[in-house]
Image: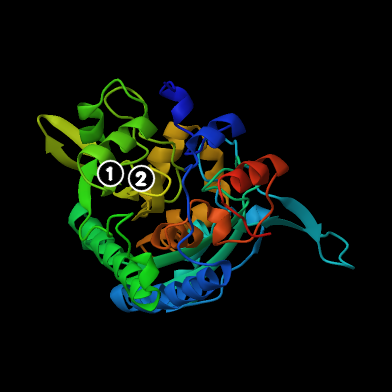
Amino acid sequence: MTDKKADLAGPGIGNYVDLANELPEDYKPLLTPMERMKAVFAIKQAIEANLCEALNLQMVQVPLIVEKSSGVNDTLDRDGSRTPIDFLCGLGLETPLQAQVVQAATKWKRMALQQFDCQPGEGLCTDMRAVRKDYFLDHDHSAYVDQWDWELAITPEQRTLGFLKDVVARIWKVIREAGRMVQEVFPQLKTSRYPDFPDELVFLHAEEILDRYPDLPRKERETRILLEQAPAVFIVGIGWPLRDGYPHEMRAADYDDWATETIVRNGEQYHGLNGDILVWNPVTKRRHELTSMGIRVTKETLRIQLKMSGQEDLLALPYHQAILNDRIPLSIGGGIGESRTFMYLLRTAHIGEVSVSVWPRELKEICAKRNIHVLE
């Protein structure tokens, strides 16, 4: 069993011996590679249109490259283990630009709400592309990342758990209906081999899950919940230390609000206005994360979270100054993994069946023995 501290930095298997044991042995793809590409783009079109309609968003362009000094690149977590790709650019400049390839557009989107003059109730959605070079490349992690990164301007009164849950429910409906749409186009996807997509999400706070499985690390707690309670859940409150002294998972301190006090249950104060949608993947027989999202920090919670994380030096950066000086709107936002969603809805065993990337020889050999052929 993985210890709790080692389990905080994010999902993943970690070595190819374990991966070989985890991949399904009787896998038979439901679609050909070309059929999968047709299905991918049908899902993509449906989700972008319906997500924008459900949350009143507009598709906008999104950067692949940002200036390092802006502070808008996503650090993904708090331990510094996942660093972006840095490079100099600008031919002919006396001082070249210090640029970075984005790891996600999480912070950029909130700044962009101001750039596009979004008022409360208005927002934006992006077809984000990123590179995360520090991932272990397994069945659902690629160095190439695609997300529907979205952000919605809100009012102070909407910074509640109820509003968060309402938005999450709307997102789940969009994803579920995209899955059923593609089943109509490709009837072979609707098979007795796998259960249909759940109608509803179950909402659970991270503290509640810890109460049920106090001795298990985070990923094992999530697995048990998906197996024993519901195949689709939204885990609320990711980042604040739980009753055992550990956060459910490390979460960056400068975008999601995980410090705000919400409800008191059984005499215990719960924290956090953020969370993740997790589903049970019947193909891989593993937990499967589709999206992380949350109501964003205020200037007060930004200070609290950076102090707790030992990162108060970040307050000098332009992005953080914009929050502190009320120059950008209050908002809610998140990133929905595109290839993760395609993988789940199209019942594939590997993210490389729906997304083109680079894969190590060890992984390709293991996959080939299991009838899994990744795209390159």
Residues at discs 2 and 1 in contact (Cβ within 8 Å)? yes
Q: Position of residue 368 (x, y in %)?
A: 62, 48
- Residue that label 2 marks: 301
For the N terminus, the quadrant is top left
Q: Residue at x 82, y 60 (%)?
A: 96
Gap between marks 2 and 1 measured at Cα: 7 Å
Q: Position of residue 79 (x, y in %)?
A: 54, 33
Residue in the foreground of this view, choosing between 177 and 81: 177
- Residue that label 1 marks: 260
For residue 78, above or below residue 123: above
Q: Amino acid at mark 1?
A: Thr
Residue in the foreground of this view, choosing between 261 and 16: 16
Does residue 155 appear in the picture of this structure? no
Task: Tell me which colouring the rendered structure shows.
Answer: rainbow
Give the secondary structure at mark 2. helix
Q: Amino acid at mark 2?
A: Thr
Q: Residue at x 35, y 34 (%)?
A: 248
Give the secondary structure at mark 1. loop
Q: Earlier in the sequence, mark 2 or mark 1?
A: 1
For residue 290, side relative to residue 72 (left or right) = left
Q: Residue at x 45, y 42 (%)?
A: 253
For the C terminus, the quadrant is bottom right
